[in-house]
Amino acid sequence: MKTQKDLLWGLIFGILFGFLLQKGGVTKYDVIIGQLRLTDFTVLKVMLSAVITGMLGIHLMKSLRWVKLSPKPGSWGKNAIGGLIFGLGFALLGYCPGTIAGAIGNGYLDALIGGLPGIIIGSALLAAIYPKLKNGILKKGDFGAVTLPEVFHVSDWIVILPLAVLLVALLYLIERAGL
């Protein structure tokens, strides 16, 4: 059960996340459209940096027994439907849920007038049809609550460290190419 302390931490980290998105420039419509057009890789660089930091941080905390991971079960159906919904919203407005919140905080009216109602309506529609989908298409290709280290039967760090090195190398190549 969530406590007020948990909610407060969520609020603090949410505000920090929004601040960092704004500082990274990824709440700007032109930057996001530039990423979609493959002319501005700011969004990719920020997201890869976040993935590397989060991946290493979460697994370090897990190793120190500060946190226990509880991955949710996945399926190809969930990925396909989620990707279609996310992609449709992204294509129509040029924002993802995180960048919409940051753009609203920056005072961008397109995010407030188009994005926020879109998130609310989309969430309500999904909540309404979820009971019909959960045992149907969302179960297709179910692969359970499994992580890559579990799939390969190896220690977390056997997957995490090489993956982090590969992602850092990718960031370096992107930066070196001037993208």
Image (spheres, helix red, strand yellow):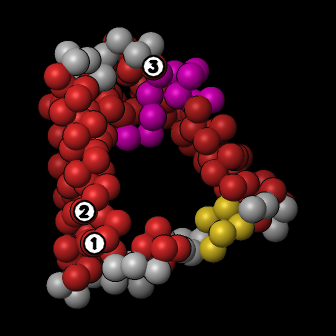
Q: Which residues are magenta?
A: 88-98
Residue 164 on image: x %, y %: 25, 54
Q: Amino acid at mark 2?
A: Leu
**Label 1 belongs to which residue?**
157
Nearer the observer: mark 3 or 1; the answer is 1
Taking the image as shown, residue 129 lies to the left or right of residue 10, namely: right
The disc at residue 161 is: 2
Q: Quadrant of the C terminus?
A: top left
* Residue placed most toward the observer, 122 or 96: 96
Q: CA distance from mark 2 to mark 1?
A: 6 Å
Residue 22 sits inside the magenta stretch: no
Q: Do labels 2 and 1 touch, CB within 8 Å?
A: yes
Residue 92 sits inside the magenta stretch: yes
Q: Secondary structure at mark 2?
A: helix
Of labels 3 and 1, earlier in sequence is 3
Q: Amino acid at mark 1?
A: Trp
